[in-house]
Amino acid sequence: MDMEIKKKVIQHCLDRVDKRSAEIMKAIQQAEEAIQGETKSSAGDKYETSREMIQQDLDRYHKQLVQVKKDRIVLQKIELTAREEIGLGAIVLTDHITYFIAVSLGQQAIEGINMMVISPSSPIGGLLLGNKVGEHIRFNGTTQTIQAIH
């Protein structure tokens, strides 16, 4: 696996993060418009409850947006250099699954390769960090052998 593949993996992840950011921004805009609509409509308990629910949605969207921005920064900092042990930015091939240690995006099909894009702070990410080729990890009752690190 060459560095061009790694560049494409990183770009794929950046594209996914940017798409998610755009979705969140649209949801924020719709929620803000809904709050404005509620302000102009009826008064009373129903109004207050609806407005509070929309505000909770807005708060959740803003937290998601902060996380997406952090994910983008993490992806932009990943170096393309080869490595001997697993760390942030590593593509890890095991005898079961291929992982990309970066941010939590889940299963992705990138350049014809199915891989799990995971955060180093995830349970499996934590098990993988610091390991080298030939070492083993045990996760959910399955032992995986590290075959390559890129």
Image (cartoon, helix red, strand yellow):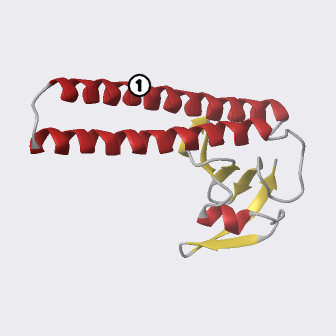
Instruction: Pick the residue in front: 144 or 43.
Output: 43
Report the residue at 89% width, 51% height from top. 83
> Hey, which quadrant is residue 30 in on the image?
top left
Q: Amino acid at mark 1?
A: Lys
The vertical placement of 84 against 135, above or below, is above
Residue position for label 1 = 26
Percent coordinates x, y for residue 59 in the rendering: 41, 43
> Hey, which quadrant is residue 9 in on the image?
top right
Q: Is residue 87 visible?
A: yes
Q: Is residue 111 visible?
A: no
At mark 1, the secondary structure is: helix
Report the residue at 80% width, 54% height from top. 148
The vertical placement of 50 against 96, above or below, is above
Left or right of residue 87, residue 67 in this image? left
Percent coordinates x, y for residue 37 in the rendering: 21, 24
Percent coordinates x, y for residue 147 in the rendering: 77, 59
Percent coordinates x, y for residue 96 in the rendering: 62, 59
Report the residue at 73% width, 71% height from top. 136
| Quadrant for the N terminus in the image | top right
Report the residue at 84% width, 40% height from top. 79
